[in-house]
């Protein structure tokens, strides 16, 4: 009986794999570069939303414990992690409280190593780094101390510098969106405003960290 169940499961898995391979890859954002090899979100979607002004747009990366911003003077973010250790950061995206226009309904984002977009790997994050949530699409409405009244999404992401980790540069690709995307016609229905930010991953060697 067990042998029959095992055989049936194997056959089902083979059939499912064959069907999946025959289907065109497609997914709701922010799967750009994951199921396809598109360079950015706007390969499929349009950046035509009313949230294109930088002054009222919030894109920040905070240390989850201290809530301090990881943004440097050049506008790029740096995540420093001791080798073998983890660090949790908060991805904060939205619009300031003084924005009187319509708020975005969803924010979508993806941390991607641009050198890995063309690879067949399902992971487009930097090699040698473990990550639990490199992308998400989240409804606005999250709260953050110091940003009361803003229209935000706030979500934690934990990264780990493995033994194979090295310094790397990521792109944080962001879309503030409204409306609903039309299945099979991603340029219709949904409006959005696209942004990019640089994120540096830096390994801190344990010996140096101990000094």
Image (cartoon, rainbow, N blue to C red):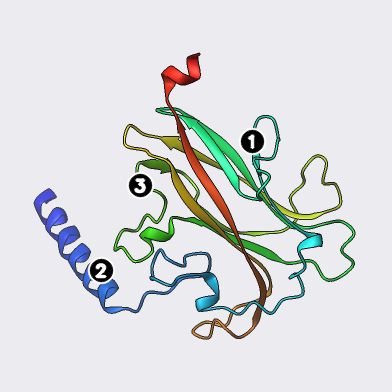
Mark 1 — residue? 63
Q: Which of marks 2 and 1 is nearer the N terminus?
A: 2
Q: Residue 150: x, y in percent?
A: 82, 54
Which residue in the protein does label 3 denote? Answer: 127
User: Disc 3 versus disc 2: distance between alpha carbons?
Assistant: 29 Å
Q: In this view, does 109 lie above or below 28?
A: above
Query: Relative to residue 127, is residue 50 depicted above or below?
Result: below
Spot occupied by residue 112 in the image (x, y as percentages of width and height): 46, 56
Q: Where is residue 159 in the image (x, y as percent from the top left)?
A: 48, 39
The residue at the far front in this view is 74
Residue, disc 2: 16
Label 3 or label 2, whichever lies nearer to me, is 3
Measuring from the top left, give residue 20's x and y in whole percent: 29, 72
Determine whether label 1 and label 3 are within 8 Å by CB: no
Mark 3 touches mark 2? (CB < 8 Å): no
Q: Give 90 or 119, whichever is nearer the viewer.
A: 119
The image quarter in which residue 90 lies: top right
Which mark is on residue 89?
A: none
Cα distance in 3D space between marks 2 and 1:
41 Å
Q: Residue at point 11% right, 56% down? A: 4
201 left or right of 67 in image: left
First in residue order: circle 3 vs circle 2: 2
Circle 2 SS class: helix
Which of the two discs, 1 and 3, labels the residue nearer the N terminus? 1
38 displayed left or right of 183: left
For this orientation, the residue located farthest to the left is 3
SS of the residue under disc 3: loop
Q: Is mark 1 on a helix, strand or loop?
A: strand
Instruction: Please give left or right for residue 127 compared with residue 19 in the image.
Output: right
> Residue 10 sits in which quadrant?
bottom left
């Amino acid at each position: 009986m067990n042998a029959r169940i095992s055989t049936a499961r194997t056959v089902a898995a083979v059939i499912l794999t064959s069907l999946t391979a025959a289907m065109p890859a497609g997914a709701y954002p922010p799967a750009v570069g994951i199921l396809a090899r598109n360079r950015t979100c706007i390969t499929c979607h349009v950046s035509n939303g009313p949230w294109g002004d930088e002054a009222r747009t919030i894109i920040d990366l905070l240390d989850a414990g201290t809530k301090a911003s990881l943004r440097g003077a050049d506008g790029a973010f740096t995540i420093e992690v001791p080798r073998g250790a983890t660090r949790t950061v908060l991805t904060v995206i939205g619009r300031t409280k003084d924005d009187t226009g319509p708020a975005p309904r969803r924010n979508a984002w993806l941390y991607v190593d641009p050198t890995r977009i063309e690879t067949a790997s399902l992971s487009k994050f930097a090699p040698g780094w473990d990550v639990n949530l490199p992308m998400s699409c989240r409804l606005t409405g999250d709260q953050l101390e110091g940003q009361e009244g803003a229209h935000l999404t706030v979500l934690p992401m934990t990264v780990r510098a493995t033994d194979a980790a090295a310094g790397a540069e990521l792109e944080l690709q962001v879309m503030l969106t409204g409306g609903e995307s039309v299945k099979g016609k991603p340029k219709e229905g949904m409006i959005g405003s696209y942004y990019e930010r640089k994120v540096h991953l830096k390994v801190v060697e344990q010996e140096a960290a101990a000094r």
